[in-house]
Image (cartoon, rainbow, N blue to C red):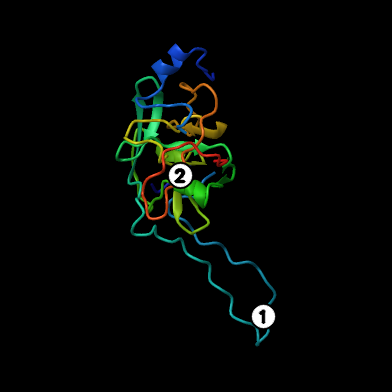
Amino acid sequence: MAHHKRTTVIVASAMVALTACAPAGYNGANSGAAEPVAVAAAEPTAAAEPEASAAPEEEPVADKAPPANVKITDELVGKKLPRMGRVVTDQDGWVLYRFDKDSDDPPQSNCVDKCAEVWPPSLTDGNPQLRGVSDDKVGTITRQDGTRQLTIGGWPVYRYIGDKKPGQWKGQGVGGTWFVVDPNGKKNLTCLPTGTPKAVAPPAAGSSDSSGGGSDYSY
């Protein structure tokens, strides 16, 4: 990961097609250029020579390591799943997604707070292993809290808490803005639900799981 730049639609027209496409347990109504991995410090801003009484210039804030209780994405795996086709998973087989309200130019995440509870960002300590994903497609961004999130093709990637086991993709098409990501960072539009599924609700305080019901949140 030493590189600096790691960085059609098929809609089911009948319920039979949707059933054949959807992963086990799917319910459409209720389912709901990047920075290099070695992130450089910002260059100091040019300024006039300070007077003797001027305060010393503040040093840039370094990237924060993910909290101890936050899961790190140690591996990105490009693979094919039945019916869905090309996807990217983490080391445990959880399917990863991208968000249309994010940006790839410049790479930026707009999923924070409650959104990030429902769509946990794929955080990194800077050295994920890659299988089936090209090194030059993978990079990182620094999130608002200072942690680093993986990007594929410039797009920040996430897991979905509505997926209850590895290999599910219940987040596909949620809110009309969340889609399974392929190894190039593009949206995998092979298998879309009918209608627009809603995201599951954020986990209750002190719980690691969601309530399971569809929510009215915009994410």
- Circle 1: residue type: Pro
Pick the residue in front: 82 or 14.
Answer: 14
Q: Work out whether 4 lies above or below 64.
A: above
Which of the two marks, 1 or 2, is nearer to us in this view?
2
Q: Could you tell me residue 32's position as x and y percent? A: 47, 33
Q: Is residue 150 in view from this perspective?
A: no
> Based on the displayed image, in which of its 4 quarters is residue 27 positioned?
top left
Tell which circle, 1 or 2, labels the residue nearer the N-terminal end.
Answer: 1
Query: Which residue is at 53% across, 67% downward?
Result: 60
How far apart are labels 1 and 2 at the CA level?
47 Å
Pointer 2 local density, CA inside 10 Å: few below 14, some 14–19, many at least 20: many
Residue 70 position within the rendered picture, expressed as x and y whole percent measured from the top left: 36, 54
Q: Residues within 10 Å of mark 1 (few under 14, many from 20)?
A: few
Residue 16's place in the image compared with 49, above or below, is: above
Instruction: Answer with left or right where residue 105 lies relative to residue 86.
Output: right
Which residue is labeled 2 in the image?
A: 118
Q: Position of residue 47 (x, y in %)?
A: 67, 71
Quick one: which residue is furthest to the bottom in this view?
A: 52
**Quick one: 216 or 80, which is closer to the camera?**
216
Residue for badge 1? 50
Which amino acid, by three-letter code, is at mark 2?
Answer: Val
Secondary structure, mark 2, is helix
- Residue that extends furthest to the left in the rendered view of this protein: 92
Q: Is residue 47 visible?
A: yes
Residue 105 falls in image quadrant: top right
Name the foreground residue: 32 vs 204: 204
On the rendered image, what quadrant is the C terminus found in?
Answer: top right
Q: Can you give x and y, in whole percent of width and height, for residue 160 in the image? A: 42, 39
Residue under the image location 54 percent in, 20 percent down = 9
Secondary structure, mark 1, is loop
**In front of the other: 188 or 175:** 175
